[in-house]
Image: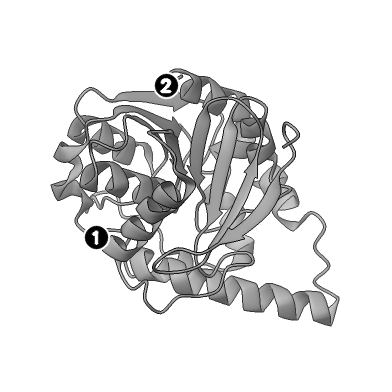
Amino acid sequence: MEANNIELRTFKAPIADIHLLEGGSGPDLLFLHGAGGLTKEDPFLAALAEKYHVYAPLLPGFGESEECGEIRNMLDFTLHTLDILMALNLDKPIVVGHSMGGMIAAEMAAIAPNDIDKLCLICPAGLWLDEHPIPDIFATMPYELPELLFHDPEAGGAMMTAGADFSDPEFLTAFLIQNARQLGMAGKILFPVPERGLSERLYRVKAKTILVWGESDKLIAMPYGEAFNKAIAGSELIRVPEAGHMIIVEQTAAVLGAIGKLS
């Protein structure tokens, strides 16, 4: 496979068919995306593929993957992703997860602590602090998202709508259907609050863990990074200035540098 050439692969797994974006060369790295999904053209995926052999599964309901009624709860999501590791025959790759994907990655490392020894969690969901409630993304209007997700909302809004033609009825219909499919699956672990008991399992994580957080994250604020850091023994919390929840596109180099600590 040509380095950095991201390709879509599809193969069978016990719970649901796997749709996987793969590319690059270097150490094996499993990347788990957030609730916004992932495409072949994603700039963060391309940046990862410059340094790693990247395997980025599309969760059921995202991209080309079908929704899966058998995946109902956090354990199902976690076991499905562990099944992906087995199907790919990957031996302890670097596991990186952003937001919802970070929640799943943390659960994987807690449930199978001997199978994952290098973990990077990028502003993961999964905990709940009453004094710092996480905004309900399911009740958030699209025009409100840039303010929640980006350090620079104006630039973030332009990035989110690049190439989109909402005046085209066919484009709008496809967008709304895809968005409903994705949020329907994500809601199984993020709605009504993104907490499924992870705090009670983080003590089981043995992996060398790097936590990466944007100092301007308004969706999952910095106190959550501090809570993860306290709960995972030996973890390191890296705070990145001028970055919000979408730190992976606002400060890509800083995120890659943090992941590099695991190589």
Image quadrant where residue 167 sits:
bottom right
**Residue in the image at 45% along x and 63% along y:** 13
Q: Residues within 10 Å of mark 1 (few under 14, many from 20)?
A: some
**Residue in the image at 46% along x and 19% along y:** 263
- Tell me the element at label 2: loop
Could you tell which of marks 2 and 1 lies nearer the N-terminus? Answer: 1
| Residue type marked 1 | Arg
- Tell me the element at label 1: loop
Q: How many marks?
A: 2
Quadrant the N terminus occupies: top right
In the image, residue 55 above or below residue 60: above
In the image, residue 44 above or below residue 69: above
Pick the residue in front: 37 or 83: 83
| Residue type marked 2 | Leu
Q: Position of residue 243 (x, y in %)?
A: 55, 33
**Residue in the image at 43% along x and 33% along y:** 93
* Residue at which label 1 appears: 196
Query: Would residue 213 appear left or right of 144 to someone viewing this image?
Result: left
Image quadrant where residue 152 sits:
top right
Q: CA distance from mark 2 to mark 1?
A: 27 Å
Pick the residue in front: 227 or 209: 209
* Residue at which label 2 appears: 262
Q: Contact (CB < 8 A) between labels 2 and 1?
A: no
Do we see residue 139 in this rendering? no
Q: Position of residue 239 (x, y in %)?
A: 42, 25
